[in-house]
Image: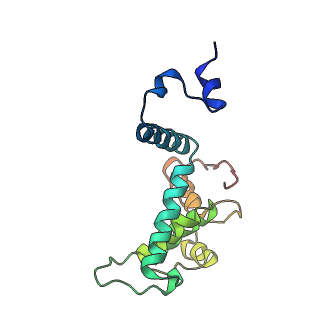
Amino acid sequence: LKSPGLVEAVGGLPPSRMAQTPGQNMIEIKGDVAQRLEANGALDQIRAQMRASVYRALLGDQDSSETAPQDDAVEVPVPMVSLVTDFLEHWDLSMTKEVFLRETSQKPIARDDLVNELATLMPPANQAVLEQVLAAVRQRRSGVPEIIPEEKPR
């Protein structure tokens, strides 16, 4: 007797699947693929790439900093846009960053200018500015310096 996993691995169908129609098999295969993509994190990346592609298709391939503000767009403070942009860039979330910048219609300021504007931070090169801001706020609340573990971006 062969195990169901082995039967499927060599191309056969287990007895429970033999009675299914080709359409039912395709639906089951699609579900299995979606579950596996979700489990290994690839589905989120695919979704981010699709969002970025939709924005590019709708707005053209223009640079996000050249996007004209929409009439009904909410004005987002540039330092906040810059903090989030720096964080997304630091963690190599380029598709999310691209969608974010297109949605905000703001051009972020340079990282050094952002750090100078926030003045209380001394930026280690290996941390996003947002992480430094959180550490500074936590330090002020507790009075104890917080050390954020150094992690490499994905």
* Image spot of residue 82 (x, y percent): 52, 73
Looking at this view, name the residue that lies furthest to the left.
72
Taking the image as shown, residue 29 lies to the left or right of residue 147, namely left
Q: Which residue is painted at 59% across and 59% down in the image?
A: 132
* Image spot of residue 141 (x, y percent): 48, 50
Against 66, residue 92 (above or below) is above
Q: Which residue is painted at 32% across and 76% down in the image?
A: 74
* Image spot of residue 35 (x, y percent): 50, 40
> Is residue 2 visible to us here?
yes
> Is residue 80 visible to us here?
no
Which quadrant of the rendered structure holds the C terminus?
A: bottom right
Closer-to-camera residue (105/135) = 105
Closer-to-camera residue (50/76) = 50
Which quadrant of the rendered structure holds the N terminus?
A: top right
Q: Which residue is painted at 41% across and 73% down in the image?
A: 103
**For residue 73, what is the image quadrant?**
bottom left
* Image spot of residue 87 (x, y percent): 57, 63
Q: Which residue is painted at 49% across and 63% down in the image?
A: 50
Labels in figure, total = 0
